[in-house]
Amino acid sequence: MDASLSDTPAVSRAFLKLRRLRDSFERLEAGRPSQPIDERAALRAAGELGATAVPLCQRHFTSADDDRARWAHALLFHLARDLRLRARIVAELGAFTRRRDAADLPKMRAIALIAELGAEPPDDAALTDPEAARRRSSRDLALCLGTPADVARAGDHLLDHLEPAELIDLFDDLVDSEPVSALVLLDELLVRDGLDEDCRHELRQRRAAARQVVPSGATPRWRRRSRDAIRCRAACHADGRRILLASDRQPGCRPPRRRVLCILTGPTGVLLDGHYAEEVTVGALEREFVHPLEREGFRFAPVALDVARGFAIESARRAVLAGRALPRPFYLGRHLLGLRGEHLDGTARCPAAVDLAALLDRATWLVATGQPAQALPLLERYVAEARDDAEGHAQLGLCRLGLGDAAMALDHLGRATWLAPDEPLHHWNTAAAAHRAGRLGTCYLALQAYRAARDVAPGAEDRRRTAERFTGEYERLAVLEHPGSSPRAVAIAERARPRRTRLRRH
């Protein structure tokens, strides 16, 4: 028989798979096939084609179309599970970055993917504008967030490759250009331990700004994995240590492979260590994880997903409360259990509390830098949630004053002085708003309260001289126009009836 004829069925099958893979680039939404079944089929076809699929994926990866490039990124990452293909992909991407005729954007995509694959990024890439390309590459990374696993990997990449100042610059750009992706990535970074506190404080402010522009419900709703696909086992040791082993089937893999998260707790239930892997066969899972632990004395038994989730949350929370940094594998693999930041509930880093504080910090900075229009929606939201916070009302009053609405400013600043009567600057700002609104009696009363308080803030001497000058002039006019009445009584009457009782300036 002719050998070429005997090979025809295999060639035909490969051609059909290649066509299925090619067609997957034609129906994309946000960088993924629009139908989950099409995504699974394309991933399976790519895995079965192996090296044959690489040229097609690389061609789309270096194209100018964002959606196609993002889907090609996911496929190449999927193909790189094969270590031989990973070496080839890294080598070919590295060679591409040195081409003089290629644009900076796809080169930076290639550098980012090389780093994600755990290889050393090339230091001899031929870039026309390295700084602009770096910024765009980080933006592209933020767009390649198709799954919670992608988000966890992207968070790791950003923490590993960007300095704190670069992270802040990146999110300044992302909040404006891609606020949904910015919010997703900020949610990931802000639950992690790998940020210094100054950077964390700045990123919380960027998150507050992103939440303001992202409509409720606009963040991605990840495709939920079947609970049956996630297997959980727990083990105890005689010394009190416990282990949780969770694994999830990888889509589109032949032979089947699983993502695996393994966490270890001490006798007190504190999370001590962890391990995460993305490419584990069922046999390797038993051989490399279960059997060695059993030989150490751990005894495994299946547990329900909800039990596993509760165990992971509680052990991580105990570690946070004990001041321990959580192991990076926990962050990379917590999506297997459907976890985000639940381990921070009840701790000093509880997201709800820090979100509100960051909202006020961001708004205060905007007011101080002359951007009251941008600060207004943040402050209105803050005051709605913290109705009795004097600083929130004070900042909203200053914001309204900056927008030219002195009457509304006076309402909020007056509320601030009522909530915190011992704060001199609240009285000073109330006086400023009253003066702007033509409410001289209210201004006089506020300045009297200001003078009675002890102002030690920078500029206090100038403020005190101004207060003395205004109150002296008001008292002189009050005596001339309302003999027999004390200046304070005149001011109170004016405050009660601002349109009827006003001093005339002589």
Image (spheres, helix red, strand yellow):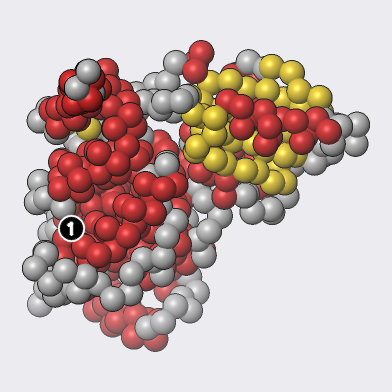
In the depicted view, which residue is nearer to us: 191 or 280?
280
Q: Position of residue 50 (x, y in %)?
A: 32, 37
**In this rendering, would 371 be left or right of 352?**
left
Q: Residue at x 47, y 67 (%)?
A: 198
Q: Residue at x 57, y 41 (%)?
A: 276
Quarter of the picture holding the N terminus? top left
Q: Position of residue 316 (x, y in %)?
A: 65, 40
Element type where label 1 sits in the image? helix
In the depicted view, which residue is nearer to us: 430 or 119?
119
- Residue at label 1? 106
**In this rendering, would 424 be left or right of 211?**
right
Query: Does residue 284 show up?
Result: yes
Q: Position of residue 400 (x, y in %)?
A: 20, 55
Q: Amino acid at mark 1?
A: Pro
Quarter of the picture holding the C terminus? bottom left
* Mark 1 crowd level (few <14, some 14–19, many ≥20, 10 Å Cα): many
